[in-house]
Image (cartoon, rainbow, N blue to C red):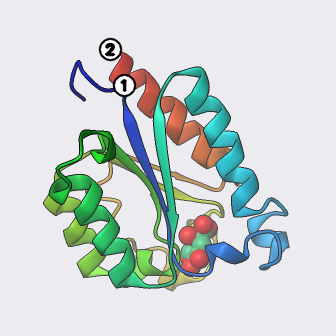
Amino acid sequence: MTATRPLHILVLNGANLNLLGKREPEIYGYQTLYDIEQDLTNIAKKHSTNITFYQSNSESALIDKIHHHGLLTGIDEEKIDAVIINPAGFTHTSVVLRDALLAINKPFVEVHLSNVHSREPFRHHSYFSDKAEAVICGLGAMGYTSALNYLLQKFAK
Ligand code: DQA
């Protein structure tokens, strides 16, 4: 963050999270992604913080978004300070998404709605957790608000 612009957080959501509310609600809850984004927007507004949301089912689109906001843009308002990411299924598969986050060298918080450790063994490994500043799983939608509140406190210091 520079003295001349407000804090800016990028919130990324991976594959199938556009279906939140309809998709396996007993696991992922009944809130839609829009509901979650509204909650985050309200918190960000109270702290005069900019927040950008992006969801994609495509790994490459997510990577392009990270590159753009993290490193490539020349526009000050588009530059970000930190990322909240739920990589969804890419959590367990994606070296390239991990590499994109490392390339921009910004702190990121990894969020999962469900407790991935209480689920199938293939969900226990994450390509992100060892590099994440924090990992939140199993809190449902509250995981996103907790991540945002954490980052707001971190950058307020
Ligand atoms: C998820 C957990 C992943 O294992 C799964 O593939 C998802 C969502 C979660 O938020 O709990 O799509 O990231």
Cβ–Cβ under 8 Å for marks 2 and 1: yes
Image position, residue 74 (x, y; %): 17, 50
Q: Residue under circle 2?
A: 157
Against 115, is 35 above or below? Answer: above
Q: CA distance from mark 2 to mark 1?
A: 6 Å
> Which residue is at 70% across, 46% downward?
38
Mark 1 residue element: helix
The quadrant in which residue 104 appears is bottom left
**Total number of numbered discs in the rendering:** 2
User: Is label 1's Cβ within 8 Å of ligand 1?
Assistant: no
Quadrant of the picture in which ligand 1 is shown: bottom right
Q: Is residue 135 left or right of residue 140?
A: left
| Residue kind at label 1, given as amino acid type | Lys
Image position, residue 113 (x, y; %): 64, 60
Against 108, is 148 above or below? Answer: above
Q: Is residue 43 left or right of residue 121?
A: right
Tell me if residue 139 can be seen. no
Placement of the N terminus among the 4 image quadrants: top left
Q: Is residue 135 left or right of residue 98?
A: right
**Farthest residue toward the top?**
157
> Which residue is at 25% across, 80% downward?
95
Q: Residue under circle 1?
A: 154
